[in-house]
Image (cartoon, rainbow, N blue to C red):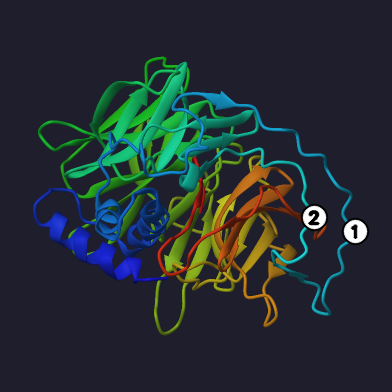
Amino acid sequence: MSFDPEDLLVKELRERSGDVEGATVSFHDVRRSAHGMRRRRNVVSGAVAAVMAAVAVPSGLALTGAFDDDRPPEGSTVASSPTAATPTPEPTPRPDGTFVMTLDGLTRGEDAQVPFIDYPRAALVTPDGSMGLPAVYQKITRYDDGWLALGYEGDGAEMLMLDDGMEVIRSFRSGSTFVVDDDGSQVVYVEIEDDGSQTLVNAPADGLDPQTWSLPKSPAVEPIGLVDEGAVVYETLAPDGTVTVSLASAEGVTELEGFVAGADASKVTGLVIGQTRSDLVDGSCWGVMDPAASTTEMVWETCDYWLKSFSPDGGLIAATVPDADGIGAPSLTVLDADTHEQLVEFSNDRQHQSALFQGTWEDDDSVLGIVTEAPTFQVVRFELDGRAVAASDPVEVDPQHDDFPLWFATDAW
């Protein structure tokens, strides 16, 4: 790539945090934000505009002229031509039982059933077709007969509530992310009030009255997930760099001790994933906690994997190597959430220098990943039997000037 996005992002966020209360971020946040910055670079024309977009993209920025003319009109839906599923050959594992992660020779399978953003075309790609986006959004999801989107304004993140045609109904300062429940029924986000205080919001996606928790200006709050309909897991970062993971419910707020960062929560099982050790010398470790049983003890812990997210039914966990960098992970592993047994693993090799840039569960049995083998990017479906098929058409970029062109629209890792 043409520059180091994490270095640039860290510099800009540190400068901004000196002026905005509650703006301090952890390396955990910086790494995820660097991903977002990388893939936003290619949506604005010109080198100067690309750097500005990487740091703070105005959410209302019109994209006219920044994309090819074949992009879908803003707010319109263009039906996709159904992709016929091609039978895939029986996958052959390597001697160690793992499978190759590569874009080389992939069979084209069914289109991805999880929405993703195609930045070169300024389009939201869904199973029903593609819809043109009127602005640069980091995340977007269906909400109350319209949409909820995350963008950027001059002094930080901004949440936008949109109607069905993508027109802005309301906008407000917000935290750096939002979380959508696996079934799409709830959205959790942070609203920053006029006085700088923060409100953690657990909102039904149908627009009914939300559940809220009032929190101080600092430290910054980031939602992680839900352990049931009325209990939200979130994390905060203290000025000394200490991350605290907490559970907010109708009974109040309880710290989940032992975590140094949060990752995911399952509303089905009530379990929580988080990082338990971060050490550049001895490596990182991750654990699974059941807050209903204990808010201080882990059910199990591992230093062999970076635990990413639960499957929709909570029975499986997607994982990568424990110290993958911001460019992407060299492998994808699926573990049993109860026994932490490895069920399947895909990894690159010397011949196939692929990287898993982003991942999300498609259903209980398959993971979607945005995989890159420069200069090509593609959505790939990974299945528990070792099969891997293409779930989108490939996109090629200029590695000297462009960056990640595809991005899952809601929760991903």
Tell me where residue 303 appears, x and y as whole percent: 55, 73
Residue at the spot 25% in from the left edge and 41% down from the top edge: 58
| Relative side of 128 to 132, left or right | right
Instruction: Using the image as rendered, state which of residue 396 and residue 354 is in the foreground.
Output: 396
Instruction: Using the image as rendered, state which of residue 377 and residue 273 is in the foreground.
Output: 377
Vertical placement of 87 versus 278: above or below? above
When asked about the image quadrant of residue 10, the answer is bottom left
Tell me the kind of residue under disc 2. Thr
* Secondary-structure class at tag 2: loop
| Relative side of 81 to 114, left or right | right
Vertical placement of 72 versus 88: above or below? above
Tell me the kind of residue under disc 1. Pro
Vertical placement of 374 versus 221: above or below? below
Residue at the spot 56% in from the left edge and 25% down from the top edge: 77
When asked about the image quadrant of residue 83, the answer is top right
Instruction: Using the image as rendered, state which of residue 320 and residue 302 is in the foreground.
Output: 320
Q: Earlier in the sequence, mark 2 or mark 1?
A: 1
Marks 2 and 1 sit apart, C-alpha to C-alpha, by 9 Å
Query: What mark, if any, has residue 79 been given in the picture?
Result: none
Mark 2 nearby-residue class (10 Å; few <14, some 14–19, many ≥20): some
Are dots 2 and 1 in contact, CB under 8 Å? Answer: yes
Residue at the spot 29% in from the left edge and 70% down from the top edge: 7
Residue at the spot 37% in from the left edge and 16% down from the top edge: 209
Tell me where residue 150 appears, x and y as whole percent: 35, 37
Query: What mark, if any, has residue 89 been given in the picture?
Result: 1
- Nearer the viewer's eye, disc 2 or disc 1? 2
| Relative side of 337 to 214, left or right | right
Instruction: Using the image as rendered, state which of residue 166 and residue 198 is in the foreground.
Output: 166
* Secondary-structure class at tag 1: loop
Query: What mark, if any, has residue 107 been given in the picture?
Result: 2
